[in-house]
Image (cartoon, grey):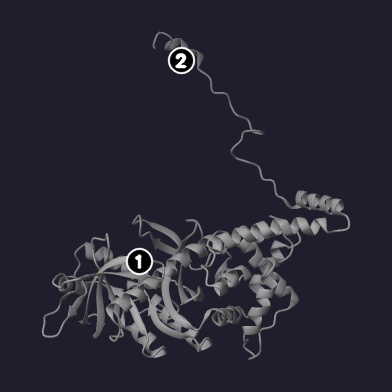
Amino acid sequence: MLFASPLNGISEFLEAVLSHSTGSSGKNVHLSQTQFRWIGICMSAMILMGMFCFARIQRSSAGVFSARALSWMLHSSKIEWDQIFEGSVLRLINLFGVQGFLVIDDSDRTRAKGTKTLFGIQKLRDKKTGGYSTGQNLVVLLFVTKKMTFPVGVRFFQPDPQWVKWRENDRKLRLQGVPARLRPKRPDRSSDYPTKITIACELIQRFRSFAPEAEITSINADAAFSCTEFTRGCEKLYPGVQVISQIRSNQLVKAANQREKSVSEYFSKQSSVTTKIVLRGKREQEIHYASARLKVKSQGRTLHIIALKYSGEAEYRYITASNLTWKGLDVVRAYSTRWLIEVFFQDWKMYDGWGKSACQRGFEGARRGVILSLLVDHFLLSHPLQLARVKAGIAAFTAGSLQRYMQSRAILDSVTQILELPDPREALRELYQSIERWVEFRPSDKHMTGRELEECVPSPSLTAKFKHRK
C-alpha cells in the first residue's frame, strides 16, 4: 500500500497527546516538525502494514522516506518517549474516566530461533505443547474503566543468566539424588535483572506518580504474582486497595483452631453455593463457589480465599483477596476483569504493529518500537468513530475492524488526492515510475528458470539387467 503522509487523524492525535505530556523541563514536550511527521509516518505504517519495518516503509512510500533516515530517527533522535506515552495515558483517562481496575500480567512473543540481535531474547516455555521456543517477554499494566480498557505501562523482562544457570544445574542434581546440603546455594539476583514481581510493582508505582488522579478499586493478577512482596507493594501505593490473585491448590492454609492443610483439602469439606452472576457486563454465568478467610502460610497473613468453578468445569481454582471486607461474589466479579488483558494481548500482537516482524534492534530500538505500537493502540481507542460510540453508550469497535477501515480509507484518499491534482495523468505516470524504481524484484528459489536441471533417466545397463523383472 502506497502512502507518503500520516493517516487522517494521527496528527490531531499527536497534538492532543503533546498537550498532556510534561517533559523533563517541566513544560509540555516539544517535537520538531521532522520528529512529529516521523512519528506519524511510523504509526501509519503500523496500521497499514501491521508491522514496524523501515525497509517496507521505504518501498511503500516509493522512496519518499529512506529506511536509513527512519532508523536514525528511532535510535538517535532526542525524543522524550516515556513522557509522550504518559501524556497519551492521561488523555485517555480524561476521556474515559479516572475510576477503574488495574490488571497486571506478562506475555511471551516468539521470534525466529536464529535471532541474536533483538533485545530480551530468551528461552520460553510453551504452555500448550510443553516445548520451548525463542522469544521476548513483557510485563504489561492495563487500566480497565467503565468505558474502555487501555495499556498504561510496559517493561521488558529478562531472566538473570546466573540464576538461570544455577536453576538448570540444580534441577540436574536433584534428578541425580544429590541432597540439598551438597548442591550449590541459590545465587543472589542481580539488580540489572529485576524479577517480574519487582517490575510489576515499579510499573504500578510509575502509574501512581504520573496519574495520581486515577482511583483504583482493585489490582488483579494471576498466580505468578501471588506473593507478599506484590500485595504489600500495591497496598502501600494504594491504601485500602483490593489485591486479587490466585494460589495453587497445594498451598497450606490454616483456619482458627484447626491444623494446617492444603487449600484444596480445606475446601473439599466445605459446601459450595451455586448462583448466577453477570461477568464483565457481558453475559450471565452459572458459578459454584465457597469462601473463607484463612491464614496462608507462604504469605504469612490472612486472605479471603474463594474456591471458584464455572459451570461445566471439573476442578476449582482458588482466588485470593487481600481486603477482607469484600463479599465473595464481588471478588469474583472483579477477578473476571483479569481476562481482559488476554484480549488486549491478542489485539496487540495482531493489529498494533509490534507483534509481527520486523523488530528493531537493541534495547532502545525495542523499547521505542513498543511505545509506538502502544500509541497506535491509544489512537485506535480515541478514534472519532470510537468516541462517538462511547458517547452514545454503544459497544466499541474491535481494533481489527478499525484497522481495516483505515486501510480502505487510505486507498480512497490516495486516489482522491491524485484526481484532485491539475494533471492526474502525469501524476499517475510519475507514480508508476516511482514504483518501478523502488519495488525490489528478487529471484525465486522455487522455479528452475535460468538454472540447469540435469536429466534423470533409466540406465541402459540396469535396464538390460532388470528387463525380465516386473
Compared across the picture, whether 459 is left or right of 79 comes to: left
Relative horizontal placement of residue 464, taking residue 240 as reference (left or right): right
Q: Nearer the viewer, mark 2 or mark 1?
A: 1
Residue 78 x/y as whole percent = 66, 79
Quarter occupied by residue 248: bottom left
The residue shown at (77%, 51%) is 437
Compared with 84, 381 (above or below) is: above
Question: What amino acid is found at the position of numbered circle 2 in the picture?
Answer: Leu
- Is residue 62 among what the camera can see? no
User: Which mark is first along the chain, 1 or 2?
Assistant: 1
Callout 2: SS: helix
The answer to which quarter of the image holds residue 308 is: bottom left
- The one nearer the camera, 121 or 288, is 288
- Please report the residue visible at 26 percent of the width from the left and 81 percent of the height from the top: 304
Q: Extreme right residue here?
A: 422
Instruction: Say if 92 sits above or below 465 in the image.
Output: below
The residue identified by callout 1 is 284
Q: Which residue, as the protein is rendered here, is positioned at the far top?
A: 468
Q: Label 1 crowding class (10 Å Cα cut-off): few <14, some 14-19, many 20+?
A: few
Asked if residue 400 can be seen in this view, the reply is: yes
Q: In the picture, residue 298 is in which quadrant?
A: bottom left
Say which mark, if any, is on residue 462. Answer: 2
Residue at left 36%, top 71%? 336
Q: Amino acid at mark 1?
A: Glu
Q: Where the N terminus falls, by quadrant? A: bottom right
Q: Secondary structure at mark 1?
A: strand
